[in-house]
Image: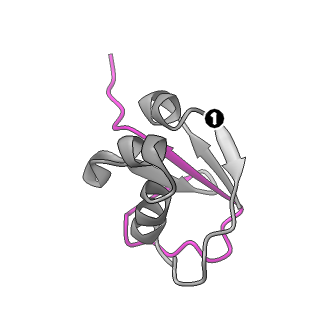
C-alpha cells in the first residue's frame, strides 16, 4: 500500500510517500502507527504522540481503530486548523 505523509509528519519522516508492506498482524491505523514508529528514529519522532496524528484511508478520514485491509492509500497528517 502507498503511505503519504503531510506537514510536520512528512518533515520528521523525511519523505512525502512510500510503498510499504506491513506484517499481517498490523490490522488497524493504530497498529500501523506503532509499526511505523518502530522502523527507525525518524519514524519514532514523527509518531511519538500518536493521539494527535490524523489518518485517511483512500481519501476518507478514519478513526485510529479503523481496519486497513484493502487500503490502497493511507495518509497521515497533524490536526488541521482553519484560518
Count neighbours of disc 1 (C-alpha within 10 A) and say few if under 14, some if 14 to 19, many if 20 or more.
Answer: some
Picture quarter containing residue 64?
bottom left
Q: How many marks?
A: 1
Q: Position of residue 75 (x, y in %)?
A: 56, 48
Q: Which residue is mark 1?
A: 16
Residue 78 position within the rendered picture, expressed as x and y whole percent measured from the top left:
38, 38
Where 73 falls versus 12 (above or below)? below
Tell me which residue sits at (49%, 46%) in the image: 76
Q: Which residues are magenta?
A: 60-83
When the figure is inspected, residue 35 is found, relative to residue 42, above or below; the finding is: below
Determine the residue located farthest toward the bottom in the rendered image. 25
Task: Name the one closer to the observer, 37 or 1.
Answer: 37
Q: Is residue 21 left or right of residue 31?
A: right
Residue at x 32% of width, y 27% of height: 81
Q: Residue at x 62, y 34 (%)?
A: 15
Callout 1: SS: loop
Q: Position of residue 5 (x, y in %)?
A: 55, 40
The reply to whether the magenta stretch includes residue 26 is: no
Amino acid at each position: 500500500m502507498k503511505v503519504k505523509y503531510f506537514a510536520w509528519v512528512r518533515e520528521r519522516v523525511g519523505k512525502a510517500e512510500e510503498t510499504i508492506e506491513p506484517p499481517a498482524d498490523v490490522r488497524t491505523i493504530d497498529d500501523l502507527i506503532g509499526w511505523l514508529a518502530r522502523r527507525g528514529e525518524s519514524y519514532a519522532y514523527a509518531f511519538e504522540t500518536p493521539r494527535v496524528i490524523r489518518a485517511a484511508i483512500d481519501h476518507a478520514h478514519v478513526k485510529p481503530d479503523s481496519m486497513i485491509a484493502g487500503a490502497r492509500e493511507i495518509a497521515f497528517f497533524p490536526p488541521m486548523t482553519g484560518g
